[in-house]
Amino acid sequence: MAQLGPDALVRTAYIAQQHFIEGKTRIEIAAETGLSRFKIGRILEQAVASGIVRFEIASPSSLDLELSVQLQKAYGLERAIAVNVPAETPEAIQQHLGGTAADLLSEILTDDDVLGLTSGRTVNALARSLRSLPRCEVVQLAGIAGPIQETGIETIRRVSAVAGTRPWTIYAPLIVSDAATAQGLRRQHELMDTFAQFSRVTVAVVAVGSWSPPDSQMVENPALGSQDRDALIARGVRAEVCATLVNDAGRVIEDVDDRCIAIPESQLRRIPHVIAVAGGEAKTQAIRAVLVSGLAHSLITDAATARRLIGMA
Amino acid sequence: MAQLGPDALVRTAYIAQQHFIEGKTRIEIAAETGLSRFKIGRILEQAVASGIVRFEIASPSSLDLELSVQLQKAYGLERAIAVNVPAETPEAIQQHLGGTAADLLSEILTDDDVLGLTSGRTVNALARSLRSLPRCEVVQLAGIAGPIQETGIETIRRVSAVAGTRPWTIYAPLIVSDAATAQGLRRQHELMDTFAQFSRVTVAVVAVGSWSPPDSQMVENPALGSQDRDALIARGVRAEVCATLVNDAGRVIEDVDDRCIAIPESQLRRIPHVIAVAGGEAKTQAIRAVLVSGLAHSLITDAATARRLIGMA
DNA sequence: CAAGTGCTTGCTCATATGAGCAATTTCTGG
DNA sequence: CCAGAAATTGCTCATATGAGCAAGCACTTG
């Protein structure tokens, strides 16, 4: 169309202002300006089409909403949250993702939910930020992956304390050196009790570990010999969620499942809502693998990682 | 309201995007998301109210549309156009205002209009930018105020040439030293012919001269003695339009009307649409006086001056 | 000049939307 | 644990809006 003249531009701006900012209806504007409501409608339509009026969706806080929506669509997620973090250091990322996860849990959990958690640094950050929670049960989904002081069961206890309930814990390592030991552990009463809760879990928050590049407390676990580790990486393992290993195609590698003390893949998949919380450059590929695997329904990550993930969707 | 949680924020962003950017109706979004259309409506309402969605009215070109609208409302003008000029020099301002005036004329004039023009630097800039015009008559509204080479009748001729018609010109100075001479000039056949057109003029483009601070070719005219000038300024004259003088209150000062060769105030006021074109810091007060006087219905000015005018409305 | 061609305008009618309301759920403070 | 308060939800009905269309208008083009 012929470029609008100055008069049409100003008139368009006026009408756009009246409609979008003052909130007047087209009919009101028509009455005031003496134009027909159809004319007003067409002017507004053209104003939007030609870019004179733009809609800006602004993050009010530390979230990048537009990126979140893109990420959600790109991987068909139930929820996706891209968090603006001030620095790309692992600590800053963990702290902010944990805080956002805490907010999300406060928001979406109800009394009837049963919350599943892994142990680990990310969930630790979550627990630190958690201020309130409905009265829901908390179930530990996997053994302890790293050094006790960092990843302790204390975290799980704190979350359940906020909720005001008793936690279902797993006093055991995530992985042991042989299947027989694992089997023995699983026969312990306390663990059996916790394992029995897995099927009741409705919402889980899980961390994502990266095997290549290595950024996971499971990979660093002494119970996993360097031989095992190299063999698994050779098998294509890229990421891990609750001791379930996946490759780039999102396929599960079950080689060491029998040595792990954690919710089995089959039960993990039956949890209605699994929220992965992870970020950082190094974990990008791992997160992608987990999303592709379908093990997680939702993701909380940093904005930079969200952009990378969208780019490779 | 309680600050929205991350999930609500992302959901809001998604719905806002679907509605405002993808153009889906609330009912469509309701069907997709499984929420009721009322819920969608309330989410959108809140998104706008809380500032998550903002409407931006952007100037596509060199115009400041929002400022234009404000200016128009502040003085109750028919049209107001605030032009972004790259520099605040008189030359840059004149060139851009003239160009915008030319665009405006191309846009709003029809074959049935009769265009009135003053002579002067501003209208000169207009003529230089003018590319096309309907076949309408062009009438000079006032004598020549400044040096012939700057403000010549050539300008009027050029405009009428673009329109493809014969111009009605005034070969006479804007002001002479005594009333008798002026009366004698007005009896000249050519001038009488032009004066007879004044009542036919439908759209006029006029410059605004400032008397205090002095920025007007009329003030500098030798036919106006320094005594006369001082007396007029003492009488409060602030501005001039087509040799009609006005004070800050917008009242007309008729003291030297009988010495001027120009459309009389009474006839000027009968022109349906008078567009003033003027800008620059020095002319701000003068423009204000003219707008208050009601002699002009519309204004084309630079953005900085528009802001000043709005501030003192 | 005349017929054709495309554009603008305002209509009708079906659909989308908002205001106000009643039912329900969720909080809160005994 | 419960009564009352407050918020939330989805309804009805009136209003606002969009799609499609026919008339009017300007503008070619032979």
Image (tube, coloured by chain):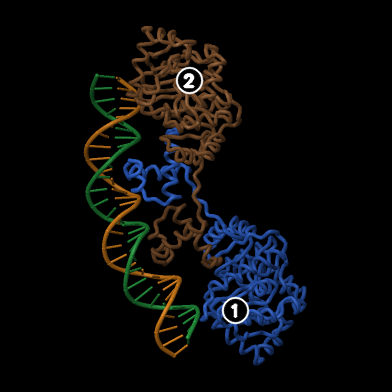
Chain colours: A brown, B blue, C orange, D green
Which quadrant of the figure has residue B306? bottom right
Whether residue B253 can be seen here: no
> In the rendered view, does A309 fall on the left or right side of A264?
right
Q: Quadrant of residue B308?
A: bottom right
Q: Dots 2 and 1: beta carbons under 8 Å?
A: no
Q: How many labels does the image show?
A: 2
The answer to whether residue B93 is visible is: yes
Residue plotted at (49% across, 31% down): A289
Which amino acid, by three-letter code, is at mark 1? Answer: Gly
- The relative height of residue A169 versus residue B54 in the rendered view (above or below) is above
- Disc 2 vs disc 1: which is toward the camera? 2
Q: Distance between the residues labelled 2 and 1?
A: 77 Å
Q: Nearer the viewer, residue A297 or B98?
A: A297
Q: Residue B245 carries which label?
A: none
Q: Residue at x 77, y 76 (%)?
A: B225
Q: Where is residue B152 in the image (x, y as percent from the top left)?
A: 71, 79
Q: Which of B126 and C9 is in front in this view?
A: C9
* Tag 2 residue: A127
Chain at numbered mark 2: A
Q: Is residue B69 above or below residue B273?
A: above
- Around disc 2, counting alpha carbons within 10 Å, would you say few (fewer than 14), some (14 to 19), or many (20 or more)? many
**Residue named by callout 1:** B116
Q: In this view, does A114 lie above or below B203?
A: above
Residue at 34% in and 17% down: A197
Name the side, left or right, on which B20 lies relative to A216. Answer: left
Q: Amino acid under label 2?
A: Ala
- Which quarter of the rendering shows the N terminus of chain B? top left
> How dense is the environment of label 1, judged by Cα within 10 Å: few (below 14), some, or many (20 and up)?
many
* Percent of width and height locating residue C30: 30, 20
Residue A218 position, x and y percent, is 52, 18
Q: Percent from the top left, x then y, of residue B75?
A: 54, 62
